Amino acid sequence: MNVQKPFVCALMALVLAACSAPGKTRSEQKQYIDHMHRDVLSSLYKLKPDAKTDIPNAAGYAVFSNANVYLFLVSAGNGFGVAVDNRTGKKTYMKMAEAGIGLGAGAKDYRLVFVFHTAEKFNKFVENGWSFGGQGDAAAKADEKGGAVGGQVLLNDITVYQLTETGLALQATITGTRYWQDSHLN
């Protein structure tokens, strides 16, 4: 039995499902993102209790939901999220997309939290978007079973946390990721 075709179809369905937040209306999509945002922060605070004080004391932060597919030499993913200005409380809804090349196979559903320690870094992210690259990890997780390597990285006044929700992936890729404001939701 050829399992490649169903596997590829399932992986592509996972990525396409993450293109935009679920919901038929603008209000439903924003509610979904806000719910995801609260859940991710709750999970992060359990894993990294220090984040519970770091995030409110930062200039701002952003929370994203992302799904990726890794097929041999190509990877692709996309997602959605929200950036919050801690000074004003203003929310900016955003989208993300990524593409890469490298060795890998599998799919991964994960969450990202960016903590911006300066207003300059936060404003630049929200106003101009952001791109970066490079990724390598191993993940095997379903519900609460399994494990994932991800963690926390500090980059020039920005702390980045990655939390893997579900997935089975082994990959090392050069990835370009782009974040931008969602004109439909803002």
Image (cartoon, rainbow, N blue to C red):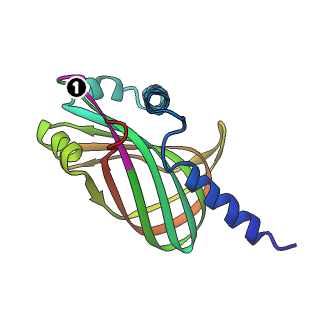
Q: Could you tell whether 25 is left or right of 82 in the image?
A: right
Most foreground residue, 180 or 159? 180
| Residue at (56% x, 61% y) in the render | 69
178 and 105: which is toward the camera: 178
The residue positioned farthest toward the right in the image shown: 1
The residue positioned 43% from the left and 30% from the top of the image is 30
Highlighted magenta segment, given as a residue range: 88-95
Q: What quarter of the picture does the N terminus occupy?
A: bottom right
Secondary structure found at label 1: loop
Q: Position of residue 96 (x, y in %)?
A: 39, 51
| Residue type highlighted by circle 1 | Asn
Seen from the viewer's position, the closer of residues 32 and 103 is 32
Q: Is residue 161 visible?
A: yes
**Image location of residue 122, percent across then percent down:** 19, 40
**Quarter occupied by residue 34:** top left
For image coordinates 49% across by 29% down, the residue present is: 28
Position in image of residue 156 (x %, y %)? 18, 49
Q: Quadrant of the C terminus?
A: top left
| Magenta-span inclusion, residue 47 | no
Which quarter of the picture shows residue 98? bottom left
Q: Residue at x 18, y 31 (%)?
A: 59
Direction left: furthest residue: 120
Residue under label 1, please give it: 86
- Indicate yes or no whether the magenta region holds residue 93: yes
For the question of whether residue 50 can be seen, the reply is: no
Q: Could you tell me what secondary structure mostly forms the magenta stretch?
A: strand
Q: Is residue 126 left or right of residue 171?
A: left
> What is the total number of numbered labels drawn onto the structure image?
1
